[in-house]
Image (cartoon, coloured by chain):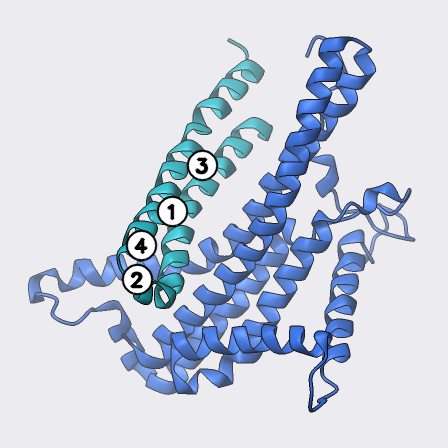
Chain colours: A cyan, B blue
């Protein structure tokens, strides 16, 4: 296998991490909605916490994307 | 890559000097990045000037400006406490700059020839510099207010004595990673979104140039997807600006209040 094909395959495998982060982000927002629908009065004060959790989960997906890009365009 | 030109999504991030030679010896050149930074600054200044006339009955414009400042004041005072007002200028600067840069970069200025839009925040140098400024404020405030007691930030209350060195190390690493992750987040979000837009925009053009029914169908689908991603870009741009401001406020809270 030459380097170019290996790069494309490797980038594709690295991109799986983005989907895993999608699961994480969905879990964060889903859990927030579950809690918010049980106690809507307390939901408004927790949006800051929601976005912190979202940012933490999303960052890992973005890192997977960065790794994929580095693999794909490395020379 | 059998048919069609090879798609080069990285070309849009190229920084080119304006009005001078590419290979000129001086490192100080006026680039398209600098130009679009100035445009972002002009938009922010115009927006703020239009809304700070201090009318007794605010018009729409002033209401918009007051909403923005009130929102960010809320973020800082809720995160840091009553003394958070002092740090509002930087939080405000970071939020408005990232927000306006993200949104201007997503605008379809490409319709006008030779007005190639450039997303300033798609460069890690820009977001990384902003996160370093945030980190410098955290360190400066922390050491100024607490001196060497600032290091107690790395030892949470109630840690068992034998675990203390390990916890100290882990907390220290997580603290030192912060400026990196803070700057990486807005950068990658814009970078990834614009690559996606570029790739699918190329699909539209290549589909039309095939002159077949299948090609037109692919073009239509890709065009719908580009519209969807374009709308998503506006949302992501706002969320990333908010997350940057919120995390900056939280990190400053760590330095001011030490847990």
| Gap between marks 4 and 2 measured at Cα | 38 Å
Callout in the foreground (3, 4): 4
- The crowding category of the residue bearing disc 4, from other C-alpha atoms within 10 Å (few below 14, some 14 to 19, many at least 20), is few
| Gap between marks 3 and 1 measured at Cα | 12 Å
Can see residue B78?
Answer: yes
Residues flagged by tags 4 and 2 on a common chain: no
Residue occupied by mark 4: A37
Residue occupied by mark 1: A57
Q: Chain of mark 1?
A: A
| Gap between marks 4 and 1 measured at Cα | 22 Å
Q: Position of residue A50 (x, y in %)?
A: 37, 57
Quarter of the N terminus of chain B within the rendering:
top right
Residue occupied by mark 3: A64
- As helix, strand or loop, the secondary structure at mark 3 comes to helix
Callout in the foreground (3, 2): 3
Above-or-below relation of B20 to B84: above
Q: Position of residue B159 (x, y in %)?
A: 12, 66
Q: Earlier in the sequence, mark 3 or mark 1?
A: 1
Residue occupied by mark 2: B172
Above-or-below relation of B146 to B232: below
């Amino acid at each position: 296998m030459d380097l170019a094909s290996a790069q494309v395959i490797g980038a594709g495998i690295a991109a799986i991490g983005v989907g895993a982060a999608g699961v994480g982000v969905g879990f964060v927002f889903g859990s927030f909605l579950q809690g918010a629908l049980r106690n809507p009065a307390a939901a408004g004060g927790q949006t800051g916490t929601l976005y912190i959790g979202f940012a933490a989960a999303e960052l890992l997906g973005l890192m997977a994307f960065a790794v994929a890009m580095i693999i794909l365009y490395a020379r | 890559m059998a048919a069609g030109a090879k798609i080069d999504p990285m070309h849009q991030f190229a920084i080119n000097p304006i009005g001078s030679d590419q290979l000129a010896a001086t490192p100080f050149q006026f680039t398209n990045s600098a130009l679009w930074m100035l445009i972002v600054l002009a938009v922010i200044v115009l927006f703020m000037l239009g809304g700070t006339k201090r009318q007794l009955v605010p018009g729409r414009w002033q209401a918009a400006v007051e909403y923005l400042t009130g929102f960010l004041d809320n973020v800082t005072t809720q995160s840091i406490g009553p003394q958070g007002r002092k740090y509002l200028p930087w939080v405000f600067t970071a939020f408005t700059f990232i927000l306006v840069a993200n949104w201007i970069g997503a605008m379809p200025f490409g319709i006008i020839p030779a007005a190639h839009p450039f997303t300033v925040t798609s460069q890690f140098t820009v977001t990384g510099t902003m996160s370093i400024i945030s980190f410098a404020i955290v360190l400066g405030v922390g050491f100024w207010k607490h001196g060497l007691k600032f290091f107690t930030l790395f030892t949470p209350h109630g840690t068992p004595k034998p675990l203390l060195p390990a916890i100290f190390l882990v907390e220290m690493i997580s603290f030192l990673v912060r400026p990196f992750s803070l700057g990486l987040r807005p950068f990658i979000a814009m970078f990834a979104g614009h690559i996606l837009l570029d790739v699918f925009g190329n699909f539209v053009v290549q589909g039309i140039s095939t002159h077949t029914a299948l090609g037109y169908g692919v073009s239509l689908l890709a065009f719908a997807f580009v519209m969807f991603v374009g709308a998503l870009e506006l949302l992501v741009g706002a969320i990333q600006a908010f997350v940057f401001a919120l995390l900056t406020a939280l990190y400053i809270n760590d330095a001011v209040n030490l847990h």
